[in-house]
Image (tube, rainbow, N blue to C red):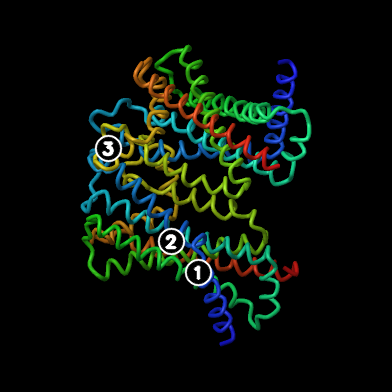
Amino acid sequence: MRVLADQVYLLARRSVVRTARQPANVIAPLVFPMLLLAVNSGGLKAETRLPGFPTNSFFAFALAVPFMQGALFATMNAGTDLARDIQTGFLNRLSLTPMRSIALLAGQLGGVVTMGIVQAAVYLSVGLIIGVRLASGPAGVLAIFALAILVSLGFGALGSFAALRTGSGEAVQSLFPAFFVFLFLSSMNIPRNLIEATWFRDVATLNPVSYLIEGFRSLIIIGWDGQALALAFGIAAAITVIALVLSSWALRVRMART
Amino acid sequence: MRTLAVARAVAWRTLHNVFTNPSLFIPSLLFPLFFFTAFAGGLSRVREVPGFDYSQGYTAFQFVFVLLQSAAFGGVFTGFGIARDFESGFARRLLLAAPNRTGIVLGYAAAALGRWLATATILTVIALAVGMHVGGNGVDLFGLYTLAALLNIAAVFWAAGVAMRLRTMQAGPVMQFPVFLVLFFAPVYVPLTLLSGWIHAVAVVNPVTRVVEAGRGFLAGSPTEVAAAFAAAVLLAAAFAVWALRGLRNAEAAGA
């Protein structure tokens, strides 16, 4: 057990250090979501005048979105890094060592989760500095971090699965627009009950990303909404479990190939 | 005459590459369609915000922005191709072979325009198919598409200037990010009058705001800020033409 923990620690540290050494991988997940938040909260502020809009601060309403965008970046970074390990032969060399394959996955995802925590801290700090007050109180901070960690883990595992299946960084990068579609066809900019176009409301209702955003959002603007939180944590947990099972299987196949 | 011959050859090659390679054409087509779907479909209730007075509805309101965005990004995507030509060494051979190198920049610009025209046609057909209202007459619509074409040319000159200075595909974000910012600091979701705070202050001085507002006026059949919009678009195109040509000289001096 101790040996496994050491292996996971070493690989997680490598994952974090490698990310930290590539400024684009650190800056983009921090700056891009904040920029989009600024643009959207400025441009869509008038939306708060719609009857039934749940808050009078669009910034507070939209603050949930960066947490999901951060998760998308986590997917891309985790997948691209792992794909590079495959392309450069690092994984092959690793398979010759006593390193257990589960340690590889756990270490990789440990790095992703660390970045997820840093991102969540930055997004939340910016929100608090701008003047957002969490309706769920100080305990809500813990719930936001817990959900952010679970979402980072799930999406990071999805990125790892893509990398292990394709073995190509370009293929992983090409998933970004697909994930972006999920984000935009959700309730990111307007509550689902205020979406007028039936087909769009149906798509947003079927889209799991809507529930993840609504989980974060409920803690920020509503308080402790049991249903929203159960759906968000449930869906995040389901994505995590499915992605981890798929990644473990893909890793076994990949290691067998090598 | 030699300039035109070079421009024609570069434009033909670029367009041939784009239209025969789905991985190059499809993203530049899908992105505006996706934004049109997400904005016009998801945010249509925004037209009920007090003070929103665009007569043709929210689909038409968003169509103009997405059309202009597709024009700008058509130029940026062409810039990616220029960077790829430099990275692969093709541009070096092109510089050696072209009797007049200004034609190279003009050729890329013509290709960006041709590429965007295909995107704009598909986008317009889809917008009309989903019931977009058009209040403007033929002259108004000509004004709208001319403004978009000028924005396309300004964007390709900007991207070409960057590509010819940096000569690497890694310059992609440098080409894309400022264009993205300038577009989204215009009144994207609501008219300028409904913006408030810092975004209103930025939008007022943003030249693309004039283009977006005039474009929406053309589509509604009630032209507004036409002179300011055309002046802004022409000035942007002219300034970035100088930027692109100086970039070409920079590439020549560096031996590409």
Q: Nearer the viewer, mark 2 or mark 3?
A: 3
Q: Is residue A153 above or below residue B178?
A: above
Indicate the amino acid at tag 1. Thr
Reading the image, the residue beneath label 1 is B20
Q: Is residue A89 above or below residue A60?
A: below
For label 1, count other residues whose C-alpha is less than 10 Å away and answer few (under 14), some (14-19) or many (20+).
few
Residue B170 on image: x %, y %:
65, 53
Viewport quadrant of the C terminus of chain B: bottom right
Relative horizontal placement of residue B109, taking residue B162 as reference (left or right) = left
Residue for point 74% across, 44% down? A89
Q: Are marks 2 and 1 on the same chain?
A: yes
Residue A238 on image: x %, y %:
45, 26
Indicate the amino acid at tag 3. Ile
Reading the image, the residue beneath label 3 is A195
Q: Are marks 1 and 3 on the same chain?
A: no
For label 3, count other residues whose C-alpha is less than 10 Å away and answer few (under 14), some (14-19) or many (20+).
many
Tag 2–tag 3 contact (CB < 8 Å): no
Mark 1 residue element = helix
Residue for point 48% across, 66% down? B153
Disc 1 from disc 3: Cα separation: 39 Å
Q: Nearer the viewer, mark 1 or mark 3?
A: 1
Q: Quadrant of residue B93?
A: bottom right
Reading the image, the residue beneath label 2 is B71
